[in-house]
Image (cartoon, rainbow, N blue to C red):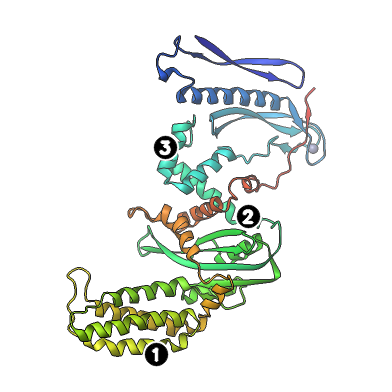
Amino acid sequence: MGWVLRLVGTGIDGQCRSFDVMEINRPEGLGDIVNLGLTLAEAKQLLARVQQDVVAAQADNHAVLRPNCQSCGGRCHVKDWRRHRIATLFGEVRVRLPRFLCAGCGCAETGVTWPSHCRSTPELDGLQARLSALMTYRVAADVLVHLLPIDAGKSPETLRGHTLQVGERLGSAAAVQPAAAASAITVSLDSTFIRGREEGERHLEVRVGNVETAGGGRQVFAAVTKSSTDITALIRRNLQTVGRTDDAEVTAFTDGCPGLRSVLADAGVTKPPILDWFHIAMRLQHATRAAGGLSTDEPGRAQAKAVIVAEVDRLRWRIWNGKATNAQRSIDRIRKAMHVFRGEHGHRTTGVPSRKLWHALHEVDGYLCSQSNWLVNYAKRYRAGLRVGTSVTEGTANFLVNRRMNKSQQMRWSRRGADLLLQVRCAVYNGTLGSGFGHTFQPYAVPEPVFSRAP
Ligand SMILES: [Zn+2]
């Protein structure tokens, strides 16, 4: 059995024009499931042909329109024709577009608001960017070509180019106007590393964070250091997007890095940031684990281990309850009890527990000394239902950076490429690449030309 698929155009002049798009043939009966319905190949062919016919009709329609001159308002006439090849989601299309000349003043008009270098539709660029943000350029290119009748601009290099362009536009986009003002905002800032491509830049530092409101508003942001993205402007914009007002209370969290603190200060976060509990807890966890591994091969050691385990626990309690000034007492007590472990034998692979404990304590001690100004009473905050840390940010770093950019050890990044891809990834995560995508694609401040029909 067979069908002819026909596209019927209903013009404004009341005339109908129809095009036979394609023939579809199937064997009689449903003996074999592979014959059920359309195949992917047919669907791609169908989309490509409908696209060709629709675009051809649009071009014909456009060709009879004449813009009014933007200088004198006079009628324009056709000067010459230009051929354009445009890549679309449904295949490459070719259109012949007139360029116009004003009969009155001689001004030239293009008749379209497209930039003259335009080679693809925003929708194609947008989908390429979205997929490239989630998977490697090569895989994204394969997926697109597999599913859609894309026949131009399908190389991974093209996808990379388009994605970075989208990233650039996102970087210069204005803040989205918030629906509601936020009185309390939490901002967290952290850093992570990716592998650099250039010699002498083996590691690129990525700053990543998020802003959150009590009402559930959330935005993530990221930027590679020393790239064109200004992290302080980015934070300001994100605060604005979630509805920061002049009297909003902004609470910041960071790890101990002074660089991150100054970024927050520059971004207008006036209250000193709180040291993230996550970072303290991680260091305490090392100490707890090392204490738990101490040997109990002699009665003296068993006794000392019990004291140490209890004291490490107390150390955690002290810091959690904002009594970090007393933490030194716990550390001293533990060190004093450790002498009985001198000469302790370690496991072949995991090392000597007492030596690990010593190192872990040294870490905690050093961290507390350098960060004492940024510690708070975490227990009190926690009981009040306030945030004590940003394990969320760790998740954010993982989503934004590691999952796309660190997974494969062979992946190396240029500063610009990594930074712009991150802008796209953030937009995907924030949901601003989909609905708000249109406005990032109209950076050309050219008014739509006014047309009248040619006689
Ligand atoms: Zn004119």
The Cα atoms of the two marked residues, 2 and 1, are separated by 53 Å
What label does residue 329 carry, if any?
Answer: 1
Left or right placement of residue 361 versus residue 19 in this view: left
Q: Position of residue 142 (x, y in %)?
A: 42, 37
Along the viewing direction, whichever of 109 and 418 lies nearer the viewer: 418
User: At 52% from the left edge and 64% from the top edge, which residue is drawn?
Assistant: 209
* Residue bearing mark 2: 173
Does dot 2 land on a helix, a strand or a loop? loop
Residue placed under numbered mark 3 in the picture = 142
Q: How many marks?
A: 3
Q: Position of residue 337 (x, y in %)?
A: 28, 88
Closest to the observer, 114 or 272: 272
Q: Quadrant of the C terminus?
A: top right
Tell me the distance, in whole angstroms, between the alpha carbons under discs 3 and 1. Answer: 61 Å
Q: Amino acid at mark 3?
A: Asp
As helix, strand or loop, the secondary structure at mark 3 comes to: helix
Q: Quadrant of ligand 1?
A: top right
Tell me which residue sits at (62%, 48%) in the image: 440
